[in-house]
Every structure is written in C-alpha cells, then in structure tokens.
Image (cartoon, rainbow, N blue to C red):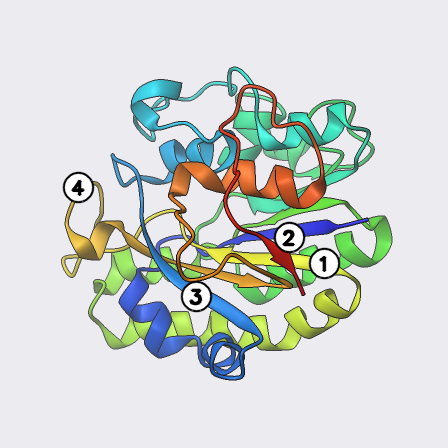
Amino acid sequence: MTKVILIVLDGLRYDAARVCLGFMEGLVEAGRAEVRKLRCELPAMSRPLYETLLTGRKPVDHGVVSNGVVRRSEGDNLFARCREAGKVTAAAAYHWVSELYVSCPFDRHRDRILIDGKGDITYGLFYWDDHYPDSHLFADAEWLIRAKQPDFLLLHPMNVDDAGHKHGGDSIGYRNAARAQGDLLARHLPGWLSAGYRIIVTADHGMGDDGNHAGPTAAETEVPFYSLGFRLGADAALSQIGIAGLVCRLLGIDPGTMPVYDGPLSLD
C-alpha cells in the first residue's frame, strides 16, 4: 500500500532550491529523484496556496484569495478524500492549515495538538510562530510517522519564508535558511523512504528580492517540485493544481471533485 508525504517548504523559490538543497540535488544527479519547475497560482500568498495545493483549485475558484480570508475549506480536499477512503491523515504544519481543515479560528490552547481527530485530519501538530524551528517541526513529523504511521502526511516548515521576509529572497539569510532545510531533508528523508513513503518536496510560492510575495514575477511564482519514490518523466504535464490529484493517484483513492491526474506515473 502506497503512503505519501507532501513537504511544502514555505516561500522557497525555484532558483534557491536548486542551489541550496544539496541533498535533493544529489539525489537528482544520482537518478534517484526528479525535479521540475512549477509556476504557483495567483495570488502568490500562503493561505490561498495551501488551499490550492490541498484542493487542486485556483484561489480565484476556491475563494481563499487572501491571507485575510479566515474560514474552513469548502468542498473536497486531500485530507477529506483520504479519510473517505479509510486512511489515516496527519499534519505537522502552520496553524492556518488547522483553520482550513480542522477548526476555525485556531485556539492555541485547544488546537495545537490533535490526536484521533474525527474530521479531515486524524493527527496534527500545529505551530503559530513563523520562527518555530524547522528542526523541531521535522521532529514533530518524525514522531507522527513513527508513532501513527499515517497514510498521508503534510509537513510544512516556515523558516525559509520567515528569513525571506526579514532579509529578502536574494540574501545570505534566505539562502542559509534554505540550506538548513536541505540538511533536515538529508537527515529525515532516507528513513521515510525506507519506511515505504513516496515523497513530494515543493513550495507554495517563492520570494521576491524585496522580501515579499504576491504577484506574478518569476521570483515570487517559480517553485521546485521534487519527486522521490516515483517518476513522472520529463514530458509529464504537471501544474500546481494537479498535485492533489497526483497524490490521490499515488494513494489509489478517488479524488472526488478534485482534478484527476492522468499523466505518466511509475513507482520506483
């Protein structure tokens, strides 16, 4: 049975990924991973694109068009489709994910830790400070994987985005935050692959040199997409709104009303 981890490195633009994620690039060079460039949907903002990644719909279609639109997700989403199929879901993620798929507004005393949830997410560990250490969040995900063996897990660290807002997308601080994430990937991914997980590493949006993001520039919209444990091939057509359907296909579940991924796919 295929299990999937979706890793969303918040705010990591494509060019920074290709020069800073040394472990991922080593896998690509060794033929053990694929990488491609995707263009994120607009606006290139966090909450709208969490919903896009997890529903397969553009912000202008799902309605979460601003970080200030604070409400539950509406319609099909990846967590809900997994639960409908009897699968276990988990998230180590920013609290906006909890607001979209668990409870809104987020109550840090009630909602930080979710165990045996009855809704879309079965197990969750959520944070609210953008500087919550990525190392801690990867450890949170490691606990979820070892203790709960979810069929689908979302891992969503924030330190690259935080560094970009503080220093700009073309800065030592931003690139060093990306390098630190690359090292965390190197420490954790081999074990998760050995445990049988197929892994996607991508980003919601990029980061402008001026330390922000929203619009259509390449720095703000071009993001990486790494695949481990499966291959799409160089000719596969994939967009950001196709990721949810791709995960459904990997898991062998019905995507419901989300877009179907019917392109090439082979498992390693």
Q: Horizontal and vertical percent for residue 170? A: 20, 69
- Residue pictured at 31% horizontal, 70% vertical: 16
- Residue pictured at 62% horizontal, 57% vertical: 266
164 relative position to 17: left or right: left
Task: Describe the element under mark 1 as helix, strand or loop.
Answer: strand
Q: Earlier in the sequence, mark 4 or mark 1?
A: 1
Q: Which residue is mark 4?
A: 215
Q: Horizontal and vertical percent for residue 155? A: 59, 52
Q: Which dot marks residue 35?
A: 3
Q: Which residue is mark 1?
A: 197
Q: CA distance from mark 3 to mark 4?
A: 24 Å
CB of mark 1 within 8 Å of CB of mark 2? yes
Q: Residue furthest top?
A: 74
Q: CA distance from mark 4 to mark 2?
A: 28 Å
Q: Nearer the viewer, residue 173 or 259?
A: 259
CB of mark 4 within 8 Å of CB of mark 2? no
Q: Which residue is mark 2?
A: 5
Q: CA distance from mark 4 to mark 1?
A: 34 Å
- The three-letter code of the residue at mark 2 reads Ile
- The three-letter code of the residue at mark 4 reads Gly
Q: Horizontal and vertical percent for residue 182? A: 49, 74
- The three-letter code of the residue at mark 1 reads Tyr
